[in-house]
Amino acid sequence: MTPCPHNKRTDAAIPLLMHCCCGPCAAGSIAPVLNDGRRITLLFSNSNLDTEAEYLRRLDALKTLADYYGLPVETDPWDHAGWLEFVSVVPDFPNCPERGERCRRCFLWQLIRTAEAAERLGAHFTTTLTLGPQKDSRMIHEIGARWDAFEPWDFKKGGGGLRSLELCRRLGLYRQNYCGCEFSKHTKAD
């Protein structure tokens, strides 16, 4: 699998910071990037998660996966109050459906923080959010296009979901049943 066709080919020597929303999405995303000859650092940045306990549970799953691949993990502190303030500009944000404007604003939050970390590390960046079945890869890529260092990988393509399931089973990774914010527990995609 290669990045989306509209992505410029990048030099394999440029490190890649991979924003990881959870272990399962990362489990389906890491191998194709490594197969492309890239050096990866994982970034766990999930202030959208509704509780600190959920944040820590997903971080633990990602660390297990990182150990499996021998990859470093950077951690962005959990700031749910800041995230809530950021997404609250969306009208009626608690009732927005999945894939709606609340999600667009959430993706922007995640990619801003990832872009800042990538700049500090002198890396390009991407996100595992594109593996999620309820996530709109096109929307994520549109948001990411505002940064030259963003690489629009679509991890759903090329069997990413199956890779994820297999590796989650093998490693016993925690597989959550909701996106992460309290609102995603109660809303569905239209």
Image (spheres, grey):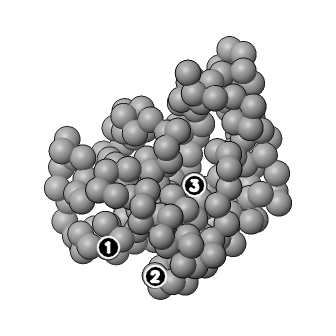
171, 115: nearer the viewer: 171
Q: Quadrant of residue 15?
A: bottom left
- The amino acid sitting under disc 1 is Leu
Q: Would you place residue 99 above or below residue 119 in this image?
A: above
Tell me, for residue 69, which label it has, or none. 2
Q: Are marks 1 and 2 in contact (CB under 8 Å)?
A: yes
Q: Residue 48 location, x and y as percent?
A: 69, 44
- Residue drawn 19% across the image and 65% down it: 11
Which one is earlier in the sequence, the residue at label 1 or at label 2? 1
Kindly report the distance in space between the C-alpha atoms of the residues bearing marks 1 and 2: 10 Å
- Residue drawn 60% across the image and 36% down it: 106
- Judged from the image, the secondary structure of the residue bearing numbered disc 3 is loop
Q: Is residue 13 left or right of residue 50?
A: left
Tell me, for residue 91, which label it has, or none. none
Q: Residue 151 location, x and y as percent?
A: 32, 51
Q: Are marks 3 and 2 in contact (CB under 8 Å)?
A: no
Q: Which residue is mark 3?
A: 21
Kindly report the distance in space between the C-alpha atoms of the residues bearing marks 3 and 2: 17 Å
Q: Is residue 51 left or right of residue 2?
A: right
Label 1 crowd (10 A; few <14 / some 14-19 / many >=20): few
- Residue drawn 72% across the image and 48% down it: 49
- The amino acid sitting under disc 3 is Cys
Q: Which residue is mark 1?
A: 34
- The amino acid sitting under disc 2 is Tyr
- Judged from the image, the secondary structure of the residue bearing numbered disc 1 is helix
Q: Quadrant of the C terminus?
A: top right
Which one is earlier in the sequence, the residue at label 3 or at label 2? 3
Q: Would you place residue 178 above or below residue 71 in this image?
A: above
